[in-house]
Image (cartoon, rainbow, N blue to C red):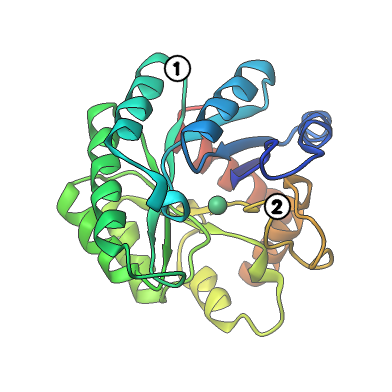
Amino acid sequence: MIDTHCHVYEEEMDNYKEIIEECNKKDISIIDNAIDINTSKEIIELSKKYNNVYAAIGLNYDQIDTFNKDDLKKLEELIKNNDIVAIGEIGLDYYWTKDNKDKQIEYFKAQLELSKKYDLPVIVHARESIQDVYDIIKESGVSKGSMHCYTGSLEMAKEFIKLGFKIGIDGPITYKNNKKGIEIIKNIDLKDILIETDSPYLSPEPNRGKQNSPLNLEYIARKISEIKEISYEEVVNITTNNAKELYKI
Ligand SMILES: [Zn+2]
């Protein structure tokens, strides 16, 4: 199994080494997602050290106020000189603040350009910003990546799939009354779905409220198998292949 989006590194969790090693024993690979230059460097080192860790590096919305153009140059150098599988996590978040919207858009667009230049997929965050995210990706011409922890409508999910994107499904699908999530899973093809935990956040049931880790990925796959009325093995096989194809691993 491949956890296609998580934050398993020192800055986010003290026990990241144990978790990576435990995942290795259970044949779980992880695509570790950075949020700034420091975490990008840290993840690159982890991906060199552990054969089940793959690096997605990028500049994320939540540190946006601290970034300057130099960070984009540093990011490009890291992309050029290292073995990474995606640019992420990037995107727009208008839930926390819209005050820096222009700067968020500027850095999102710049990283979409890097995705094209280096032929790498993107891992995209959107919160209360889905229409802008869609319009900007469409205009950029980027045609591969994932909409991570997708919370938009079914119609919009279909539009992202038309652009070539996959839909990332996380722990909240296991929460009671997630009608929107269930509707989306029922109505899109398994080949368009990726499974992810967004660890250390958003633990699925039955571990809701505790620290999340990629070891919880199976609860998400099990829930999808229930909703789609297919076997757990089929969900694991197909979503793993989706991730391998998209991230070339
Ligand atoms: Zn994330």
Amino acid type for the residue under numbered disc 2: Pro
Q: Does the residue tagged 2 have its C-beta within 8 Å of any atom of ligand 1? A: no
**Residue 163 location, x and y as percent?**
27, 54
Is 17 on the left-hand or right-hand side of 66?
right
Q: Residue under circle 1?
A: 82
CB contact under 8 Å: marks 2 and 1: no
Please report the residue visible at 37 percent of the width from the left and 43 percent of the height from the top.
67
Give the alpha-carbon distance from disc 2 to disc 1, as whole Å: 25 Å
Quarter assignment of residue 120? top left
Looking at the image, residue 153 lies above or below residue 247: below
Query: Residue tagged by mark 2?
Result: 200
- Of the residues under marks 2 and 1, which one precedes in the sequence? 1
Residue 60 seen: yes
The answer to whether residue 229 is seen in the rendering is no
From the top left corner, tell me how far across and down residue 154 is, in percent.
41, 75
Quarter of the image with the N terminus in it: top right
Which residue corresponds to the image point at 67% horizontal and 17% vertical from the top-left?
Answer: 49
Residue for point 67% across, 36% down: 9
- The residue depicted at 83 percent of the width and 29 percent of the height is 25
Q: Is residue 97 left or right of residue 28?
A: left
Q: Is residue 82 left or right of residue 117?
A: right
**Residue 117 shown left or right of residue 121 in the figure:** left
Residue 182: give x, y in percent of width and height.
58, 76
- In the image, residue 172 sits, relative to residue 64, either above or below, namely below
* Residue kind at label 1, given as amino acid type: Asn
In depth, the one of 98 and 53 nearer the eye is 98
